[in-house]
Image (cartoon, rainbow, N blue to C red):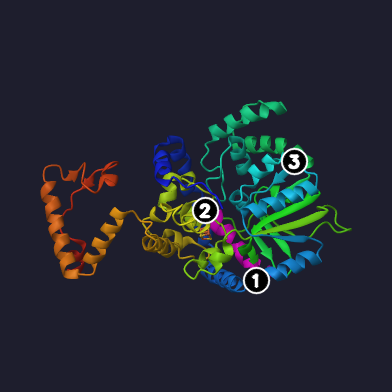
Amino acid sequence: MSAPRPQFKAQAGRALRDAQLQHALTHIRSGFVENRRKALEVLPEFEVLRRAGKAIKDHTLANLDLYLERFEREVQASGGQVHWAGDAAEAREIVLRLCAEAGARTVTKGKSMIGEEIAINAALEAAGIEPVETDLGEYIIQLAGETPSHIIAPALHKTRAQIVALFRKHHAQYGLSQALESVPEIVDEARQVLRDRYFQADVGITGANFLIAETGSAVVVTNEGNGDLTATLPKTHIVLASLEKVVPTREDVNVLLRLLARSATGQAFTAYTSFFTGPRRTDDLDGPDRFHVVLVDNGRSVIAGDSDFHEVLRCIRCGACMNHCPVYNAIGGHAYGWVYPGPIGAVLTPLLIGEEQAADLPNASTLCGRCEAVCPMSIPLPGLLRKHRERQYAERIVPPRQRLALRAWAWLAQRPAFYHLSTRAGMRLLRLLARRHGRFHRLPLAGGWTANRDLPAPQGETFLAAWKRGERP
Ligand code: SF4
């Protein structure tokens, strides 16, 4: 599969210098982080739910083939069809074939990360089919010609002024030119434009938050109701989902939905939670005539069989890890260079596009552990980042200078007495050298640090000496 090689360092540098992006990123703390904290405060059983959610996913992943087969049988029994796609190219081919069979010229789309992963919009456009994003955030970035920067808030990086400017540029063709002051006015104008597009669409493509094996249903959660209109108004509904979205029963989905909403937005439940099962039945008031599910592997079965990384498939795409990540908070999602940003992206991207291709991502972390602490599926993200680093070292992806430094460090760390002696000596030397200013503006081998900030000279004694004396922070 060909994916762009993320230029993480250059993109992170640009993000840090982008004043508008920095302003937009400040909303994460007051919004998602604060709302999640409040939601958990009033839910004492969160930890119990979390353990139950993890157990459900672990059990499903251990029996993935059985549940996927059951899911396929139930979809067929309800009149739908399942299509298996080994990789992104095959998934695109299947979707294009289904669109051609439906004679589609316009396709409405609900938000779907797997759609981003297989670059379905570009494929549809190349085939002369117009994809229309219906999630407000996705619609905004479609107008801007950009990719999502967050998995649940794709246009998080855009300021209100930028969105209004985009609407003025693209909505003049619909006779819309009024000044937009507030968020409700922006939402209202997007609705006016999208209303007609829903009725023009021949095919609706949605993702799925979960697939239920026992009923053959696809579960879609949104806060705008756009998923329901996308799924029910066109004559053909295509669900695009990756293999690990399947769960055994409706009860299992209830547990996961409670975890998802609270971790993602701090809501007790998402505003719209819809279960789509097969095409329209004779006594249904609405619904599509054809119901297709495209099950995309694209590397998942390899990950499922990888004892080092299979836990990453428990992810329910809530975004909590990125909201709480100091690195994501500093640089936003685009710096990660591919579909999945933040800690989950740093673990998943090298698995999907190649360790060497995404080598910077697992190294862009201090391993502070916040992501694991907030992950509703208890995915050990810092541990997985460390495993990537070990793999990079073993596969000689780590540059020679860094390998040498790591070897020297390992040699030192295995000799505690010598380690203490040398850190004490090093500290004294640094203190002496920095005597006049108390800090370094430049330091050999630490150019990456001193390029953007001074390095304060060490004060007092080493951490280990203080620890030995019984001082605890
Ligand atoms: S890794 Fe955990 S916190 Fe991050 S998106 Fe997935 S489920 Fe949410």
Cα distance, mark 3 to mark 2? 37 Å
Judge the density around disc 2: few (<14), some (14-19), many (≥20) Cα neighbours within 10 Å: some
Q: Which residue is mark 3?
A: 106
Q: Position of residue 349 (x, y in %)?
A: 50, 55
Q: Note whether ligand 1 is within 8 Å of mark 1.
A: no
Left or right position of 278 against 267 = right
Q: Amino acid at mark 2?
A: Asn
> Bounds of the magenta span?
247-265
Quadrant where the C terminus sits is bottom left
The kind of secondary structure element at disc 2 is helix
Quadrant of the rendered image containing residue 380: bottom left
From the viewer's perspective, is the residue at label 3 or at label 2 nearer?
A: 3
Cα distance, mark 3 to mark 1? 34 Å
Decide which of 324, 123 is in the foreground and name it.
123
Q: Position of residue 79 (x, y in %)?
A: 82, 62
Decide which of 402, 365 is in the foreground and name it.
402
